[in-house]
Image (tube, rainbow, N blue to C red):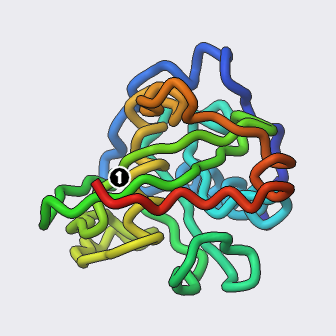
Amino acid sequence: MGKVLKIREVGDPILQKKCDEIDIKNINREILDIIEDLKATLEFGTGLGIAAPQIGVNKRIIVVGAKKENIKYNDAEEIPITAMINPIWKKISEDTDIQYEGCMSVPVIRGKVERYKNIELTYFNENGEKIVRQVNGFFARLVQHECDHLDGIVFLEKVKEHNGFATVDNINKYNLRYKERI
């Protein structure tokens, strides 16, 4: 069982660093413990994904997982808790959309971010097996957001519109849903 760890918030220097790749041939107890801590921290918190730098670890690991009732995006599918080591993605179409995103490292503030709707995702699981799959919609958005963390990018840097920010309370209060297609 992993430990629930403090989430690093925007301004913490570790969130600005590009993370180190993991030697897939050497997935040891240390790496598995980091994954367990990420899972425990994600399940304890309010997020749908978490990246290792958010708990202060400079490694290319993300964990995603979302129960249907916790997803605020339309047409989003449930995502089982999944650990990804050295994840990478590439777009498989030019289709994008803009939606509000949030982040456990940026409490209260949400921002309109453009993301690809269809991507090919490649990662290694906890057993060192290579997984390649296509993901779409909300799952694609979540993966892109978490992979940004591994490159030292927080979603705030991707908000392009001068009025592209809102608080969580105001998104709920005014039922703000930005679904304009670009």
* Residue 148 percent coordinates (x, y): 41, 39
* Residue 150 percent coordinates (x, y): 43, 37
User: From the viewer's perspective, is residue 169 above or below residue 40?
Assistant: above
Q: Say which element carries label 1.
A: strand
Q: Residue at the location (36% across, 58% down)? A: 97
Q: Quadrant location of the N terminus?
A: bottom right
Foreground residue, 5 or 169? 169
Foreground residue, 133 or 172? 172
User: From the viewer's perspective, is residue 11 above or below residue 4?
Assistant: above
* Residue 156 percent coordinates (x, y): 54, 29
Going by the image, does 169 lie left or right of 39? right
Name the residue beneath numbered marker 1. 115
Q: Residue at the location (18% across, 56% down)? A: 90
Foreground residue, 17 or 94? 94
Q: Quadrant of residue 55?
A: top right
Foreground residue, 54 or 164? 164
